[in-house]
Image: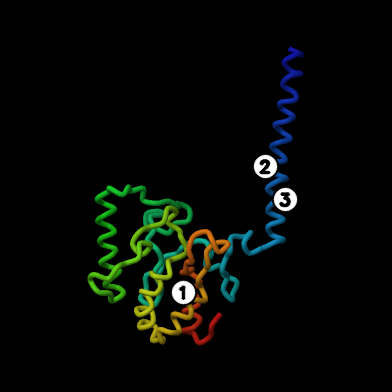
Amino acid sequence: MKIIISQLRPAVISTLVLAVVCCGIYPLAVTGIAKLASANKADGSLIVDKHGVIIGSSLLGQNFSGEGYFHPRPSAAGASGYDPINSGGSNFGPTSQKLADSIKERVSAYRISNGLAPNQPVPADAVTASGSGLDPHISLANAVLQVARVAKARSLPPENVSELIAANTDSASLGLLGVAGVNVLKLNLSLDALSAGALP
């Protein structure tokens, strides 16, 4: 019995020490360093209005469907989409007829909504959901095709709306990874500020 205890004691102590270090000290240290280096990013890149109310996160997509707003990518996260607690894709494969039908419907609706010709090419991100269903960005091509609709709905010059797209475009990570994308939440908040008479 003493031999068993003598062999178990180091294993139990090692487990407890590693649990304290890996599950307590290390996460706290990393979080502390992150908050010192960039508090906003460490807290989730939250966007807060002038009253201190959290509007959302620049890292999570939200649904905008009004004519005067840029529309995000479709979402399969949750029953109604854009559910941050239920992130995920549709899991339909490329041979799925249901996926093909939904894309066909989205293409038609996108063209009608944005006043495009029946044969006008539509960006893939405008009619397909991302793997997470919470992508905060749309492609530049997608944003450009929505300019006329948004400008008309808000009675704004299209040039002003295009300037906001440029101001809310995030470049590729490190200039190499991925492609430039337009942050939809930031862009729509900038539109609201412009319509109110003052840019943020």
Which amino acid type is marked by label 3?
Answer: Ala
Up-down relation of residue 145 to residue 177 (above or below): below
Find disc 1 in the rendering and name its residue: 188
Q: Are marks 1 and 3 in contact (CB under 8 Å)?
A: no
For marks 1 and 3, the one nearer the N-term is 3
Residue 22's spot in the image, x, y percent? Answer: 68, 41
Neighbour class for label 2 at 10 Å: few (<14), some, many (≥20)?
A: few
Residue 36's spot in the image, x, y percent? Answer: 72, 61
- The residues bearing labels 2 and 1 have C-alpha atoms spaced at a distance of 39 Å
Residue 195's spot in the image, x, y percent? Answer: 46, 84
Q: Is residue 190 left or right of residue 9?
A: left
Find disc 2 in the rendering and name its residue: 23
Which SS class for mark 1? helix
Which SS class for mark 3? helix
Residue, far front: 176
Which amino acid type is marked by label 1?
Answer: Asn
Which image quarter is the C terminus in?
A: bottom right
Find disc 3 in the rendering and name its residue: 29
Which image quarter is the N terminus in?
A: top right
Residue 194's spot in the image, x, y percent? Answer: 49, 83
- The residues bearing labels 2 and 3 have C-alpha atoms spaced at a distance of 11 Å
> What residue is rendered at 50% in x and 77% in y?
190
Q: Is residue 8 left or right of residue 92?
A: right
